[in-house]
Image (tube, coloured by chain):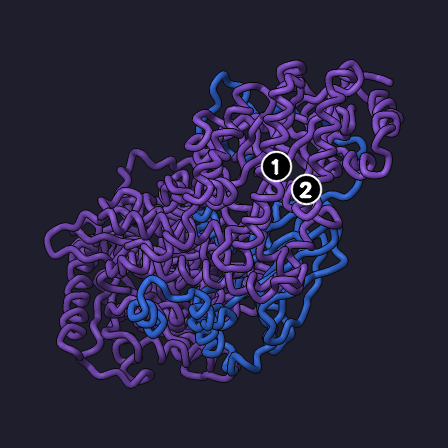
Chain colours: A purple, B blue
């Protein structure tokens, strides 16, 4: 027979009794099992028999043994003295007999372990080296938390080792070091030592000899056999198990060269190095996984456990740094005890075994209920002292527990997010929530730019701005940008495509969830400013949930976009959502006189609910000499004049009219070309339409800001031939760069341009009118330059964002006053 | 709740605690009024999923789909996301389970050592699945000896003389910190 180590690990636990039934069982266990066990071990020591056993004492059993009625017996002190004399290695347990892999949060698992460890320290005076994982239940990450608590080893079922990755060289003969540096000892399932002993008492050693020889073949060292005994299973059979232990210990000395009793810690001192591998998840429950604990009879429990652990963590985070009264601390500590008690798998096991089903269900519910009530009492600062006292008396476990263990490790992850910090407000400053589906760098239409410019200038005037928008690839989910907080929301995608309107709905759910989460963490807002119908659902929901006024800006309407014709179901729906948004809003902002007429008519809005605040222009001014004119060669030949359009390629923008006008223009002024920048649904149609004009029409697609600004500047005339245009911010930007503009006489555009003075207004959709005005600009560069200079002057003075932000803030004030006066 | 508390106060500390459990815990799911979807790996082939939908979300859905919540189709979609950076569209494979009014499901016939994500959602009138909430990912246990897996070593933090109080996770875990649930999209 090859020499081997034998680690006999005993586990002592009982469900903490709160009724006569379980109390009887617990007393019986102490009387029949634990007292005789102690006597046996002490007797062996007195006889100077050399032996080494390992025992895990759960906090429940510790609490039970610490009761007044057992005080005389000094049970724990005697275990400790056995440990001190080297016969016994006592290891820690989780705080309650809880299945760690079925917990929801890391905080909860950490608390289980940390509380178990500190309870051990309280009772035995030093730090435990090993730990008993309840039911040997393991999944990746549990080892990380064991390492954080400086634990050196734990026990798993054999398949956790056998299915480890990579395949362990030494199989079950040696422990495996997990990647977090904790040693896992696998239970040896090949032999049930105790059962063998039962049937072959005298020849016991010989029976296991074969197995050990086999195991030794796989090992490059003296193998260790781990045998785990759950003492709770043997209470009625205590005599036999004690006889077995007696036999093993007495034979230890005689057979030490073959099978030597050792604890895992002795083994690790002897062989500090072992292979590293990732354990497989599993437990020692029937079947090897978790179905004994999570099955149709018990599955309902986990939802409540998870909900309660979350509440406990939230409270711990919340009260971590508070100065609390003694009673508050007691209530929170008791809540922690009750949660740990609910987490014990004892209840699930009793339910499955069916003997004490009702009792177990009731106990579980009670503990959950107690946590809930205690936390409610603390939350409402109305603690019933007698209630706390009563619970403390019923469940007097873990006397030195500290609820703060449940706090999240990195609080900055939870409550310290930069955007949750108190806003620094200027005089009269407000905390404003901007809802906009597009925001730079996602720029689809004018909305993104308008929201950005407005927000930037509101910040400058002492307001606190949070923009909630959609995610863009390559941009962070949260960004502090030009003094404003930008939150980009992830919208769930799936394996199939999703209708646009349904996507909009999903986006709104994400917005709502996020803002409410910020609210629950203490972030307040004074006003919600929603931009266009796409954010309607969120705007409405948040208006009622946060109880703050809602201001809506209508950048365009579905009626306008479709020339007053609402036909398809989608158009109907959008029009409806727009109507709803203006209905829910305390005040509506629009950007031009034309829009004012439109919204009043389409949405039946009273005049005092609508404010006209036009958009502004805010471009960085670039000095003449800093422009890289050589870039122009990429787009046009020297001397060839550029007609430039930028914007979405959609019908309402009238690009088709511009392309139709090109032959006329070329006939009149041949050395020119049309450059079209932007993307959109009509791209293919437009390209087909322009094909006969060859290189005289160039599509450059979507351009970045830099190229856009360059082209606006390099162009000889910028043309915006829209059929519908609520405002036309891009025309303002063109004017701001000092390039002459030709626009169509429609909506906001007709209000910007003074015809013949600072630009031309062509008849909307009229090819001849448009071509004449463009050609006129090209033929008379001096006049064009004069007009452009006047136009630039206008943008600087009239379309000034500072002024616009101020007026918008006034609207917020009006909306707030109206709400406060109950309007 | 209030009533129960009163009972305790009146009868004092000697009350038999079993009287408290008259509260029906099944009703609590509604009481929490939270949006949750959670997966738990039971064994190599099975996952337990449970979920709940807040009244707010039910109301929003009813508004948008113009249907009463009770008659909306309710579906969970299970994605196999093993070894993927899952973005919703790129699952190895997926399948739908119409769940009716049930608030939990035992999902069978899954692969061992594989990662799964579940969505709770509905179908629109075109039969497109619209996710309403997404679970975190969960990995089923391995149930076979590994062949040809790479050697692993201990993570750098534990190679130091005194490892830090907090060790970052270096491998996939079935649990997460609370903030991960609260701020990373899943519920």
- For disc 1, the marked residue is A36
Left or right: residue A160 compared with residue A812:
right
Q: Quadrant of residue A258?
A: top right
Describe the element under mark 2 as helix, strand or loop.
helix
B26 shown above or below A280 = below
- For disc 2, the marked residue is A238
Q: Quadrant of residue A508?
A: bottom left
Is residue A394 visible to the viewer in this orientation of the structure? Answer: yes
Residues at marks 1 and 2 touching, judged by CB atoms closer than 8 Å: yes
Tag 1 and tag 2 share a subunit: yes
- Residue density around tag 1, few if under 14, some if 14–19, many if 20 or more, within 10 Å: some
| The C terminus of chain A sits in image quarter | bottom left
Describe the element under mark 1 as helix, strand or loop.
helix
Taking the spot 21% from the left edge, 67% from the top edge, the residue there is A613
Taking the spot 70% from the left edge, 31% from the top edge, the residue there is A245
B8 shown above or below A115 = below
Which mark is first along the chain, 2 or 1? 1
Of residues A305 and B85, the one nearer the viewer is A305
Is residue A745 visible to the viewer in this orientation of the structure? Answer: no
- Residue density around tag 2, few if under 14, some if 14–19, many if 20 or more, within 10 Å: some
Check the residue under mark 2 and report the chain it is in.
A
- Where is residue A103? Give x, y as percent: 54, 49
- Where is residue A182? Give x, y as percent: 59, 27
- Where is residue B55? Give x, y as percent: 44, 73
Of residues A648 and A579, the one nearer the viewer is A579
Of residues B177 and A672, the one nearer the viewer is B177
Taking the spot 47% from the left edge, 41% from the top edge, the residue there is A70
Distance from disc 1 to disc 2, alpha carbons, whole Å, reads 8 Å
């Amino acid at each position: 027979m090859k020499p081997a180590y034998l680690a006999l690990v005993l586990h002592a636990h009982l469900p903490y009794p709160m009724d006569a039934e379980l109390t009887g069982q617990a007393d019986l266990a102490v009387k029949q099992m634990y007292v005789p066990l102690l006597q046996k071990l002490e007797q062996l020591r007195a006889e100077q028999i050399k032996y080494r056993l390992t025992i895990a004492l759960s906090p429940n059993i510790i609490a039970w043994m610490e009761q007044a009625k057992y005080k005389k017996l000094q049970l724990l002190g005697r275990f400790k003295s056995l440990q001190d004399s080297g016969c016994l290695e006592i290891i820690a347990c989780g705080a309650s007999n809880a299945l760690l892999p079925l917990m929801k949060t890391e905080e909860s698992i950490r608390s289980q372990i940390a509380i178990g460890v500190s309870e051990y320290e309280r009772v035995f005076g030093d730090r435990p080296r090993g730990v008993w994982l309840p039911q040997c239940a393991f999944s990746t990450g549990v080892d990380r938390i064991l390492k954080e608590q400086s634990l050196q080893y734990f026990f798993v079922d054999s398949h956790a080792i056998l299915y480890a990755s990579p395949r362990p060289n030494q199989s079950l003969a040696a422990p495996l070091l997990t990647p977090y540096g904790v040693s896992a000892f696998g239970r040896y399932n090949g032999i049930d030592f105790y059962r063998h002993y039962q049937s072959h008492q005298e020849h016991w050693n010989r029976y296991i000899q074969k197995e050990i020889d086999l195991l030794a073949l796989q090992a490059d060292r003296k193998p260790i056999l781990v045998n785990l005994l759950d003492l709770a299973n043997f209470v009625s059979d205590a005599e036999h198990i004690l006889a077995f232990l007696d036999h093993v210990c007495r034979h230890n000395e005689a057979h030490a060269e073959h099978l030597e009793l050792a604890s895992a810690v002795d083994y690790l001192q002897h062989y500090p190095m072992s292979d590293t591998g990732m354990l497989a998840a599993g437990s020692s429950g029937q079947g090897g996984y978790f179905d004994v604990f999570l099955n149709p009879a018990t599955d309902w429990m986990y939802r409540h456990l998870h909900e309660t652990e979350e509440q406990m963590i939230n409270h711990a985070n919340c009260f971590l740094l508070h100065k609390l009264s003694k009673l508050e601390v007691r209530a929170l500590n008791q809540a922690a005890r009750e949660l740990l008690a609910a987490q014990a798998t004892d209840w699930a096991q009793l339910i499955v075994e069916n003997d004490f089903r009702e009792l177990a269900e009731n106990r579980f519910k009670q503990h959950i209920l107690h946590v809930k009530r205690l936390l409610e009492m603390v939350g409402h600062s109305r603690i019933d002292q007698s209630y706390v006292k009563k619970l403390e008396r019923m469940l007097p476990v873990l006397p030195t527990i500290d609820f703060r263990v449940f706090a999240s490790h990195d609080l900055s992850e939870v409550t310290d997010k930069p955007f949750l910090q108190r806003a620094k407000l200027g005089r009269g400053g407000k905390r404003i929530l901007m809802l906009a589906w597009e925001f730079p760098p996602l720029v689809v239409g004018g909305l993104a730019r308008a929201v950005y410019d407005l927000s930037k200038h509101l910040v400058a005037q002492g307001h606190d701005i949070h923009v909630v928008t959609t995610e863009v690839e390559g941009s962070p989910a949260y960004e502090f940008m030009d003094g404003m907080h930008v939150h980009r929301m992830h919208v769930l995608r799936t394996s199939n495509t999703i209708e646009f309107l349904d996507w909009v709905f999903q986006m709104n759910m994400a917005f709502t969830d996020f803002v409410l989460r910020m609210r629950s963490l203490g972030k307040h807002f004074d006003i919600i400013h929603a931009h266009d119908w796409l954010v309607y659902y969120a705007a409405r929901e948040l208006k009622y949930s946060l109880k703050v006024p809602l201001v809506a800006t209508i950048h365009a309407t579905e009626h306008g976009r479709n020339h007053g014709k609402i036909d398809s179901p989608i158009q109907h729906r959008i029009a409806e959502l727009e109507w709803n948004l203006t209905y829910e809003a305390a005040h509506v902002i629009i950007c031009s006189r034309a829009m004012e007429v439109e919204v009043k008519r389409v949405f039946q809005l009273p005049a005092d609910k609508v404010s006209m605040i036009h958009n502004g222009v805010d471009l960085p001014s670039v000095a003449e000499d800093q422009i890289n004119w050589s870039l122009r060669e990429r787009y046009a030949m020297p001397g060839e004049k550029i007609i430039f359009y930028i914007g979405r390629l959609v019908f309402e923008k009238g690009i088709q009219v511009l392309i139709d006008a090109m032959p006329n223009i070329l006939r009149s002024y041949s050395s020119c070309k049309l450059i079209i920048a932007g993307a959109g649904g009509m791209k293919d149609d437009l390209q087909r339409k322009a094909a006969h004009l060859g290189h005289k029409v160039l599509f450059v697609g979507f351009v970045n800001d830099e190229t856009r600004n360059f082209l606006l500047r390099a162009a000889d005339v910028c043309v915006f031939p829209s059929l519908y245009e609520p405002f036309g911010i891009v025309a303002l930007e063109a004017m701001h760069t000092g390039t002459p503009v030709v626009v169509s006489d429609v909506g906001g555009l007709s209000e910007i341009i003074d015809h013949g003075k600072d630009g031309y207004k062509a008849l909307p959709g009229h090819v001849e009118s448009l071509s004449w005005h463009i050609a006129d600009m090209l033929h008379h560069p001096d006049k064009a330059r004069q007009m452009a200079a006047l136009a630039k002057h206008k943008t600087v003075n009239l379309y000034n964002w500072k002024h616009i932000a101020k007026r918008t803030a006034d609207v917020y004030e009006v909306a707030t006053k109206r709400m406060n006066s109950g309007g | 709740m209030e009533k129960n508390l009163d009972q305790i106060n009146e009868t004092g500390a000697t009350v038999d605690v079993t009287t408290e459990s008259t509260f029906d815990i099944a009703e609590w799911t509604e009481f929490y009024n939270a949006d949750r979807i959670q997966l738990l790996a039971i064994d190599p082939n099975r996952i337990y999923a449970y979920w709940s939908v807040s009244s707010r979300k039910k109301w929003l859905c009813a508004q948008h789909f113009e249907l009463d919540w009770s008659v909306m189709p309710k579906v969970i979609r299970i994605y196999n996301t093993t070894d993927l950076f899952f973005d919703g569209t790129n699952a190895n494979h997926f399948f739908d389970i119409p769940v009716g009014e049930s608030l939990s499901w035992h999902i069978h016939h899954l692969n061992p050592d594989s990662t799964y994500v579940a969505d709770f959602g509905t179908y629109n009138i075109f039969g497109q699945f619209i996710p309403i909430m997404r679970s975190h990912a969960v990995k089923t246990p391995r149930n076979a000896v590994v062949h040809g897996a790479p050697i692993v070593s201990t993570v750098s933090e534990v190679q130091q003389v005194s490892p830090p109080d907090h060790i970052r996770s270096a491998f996939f875990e079935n649990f997460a910190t609370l903030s991960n649930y609260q701020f990373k999209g899943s519920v």
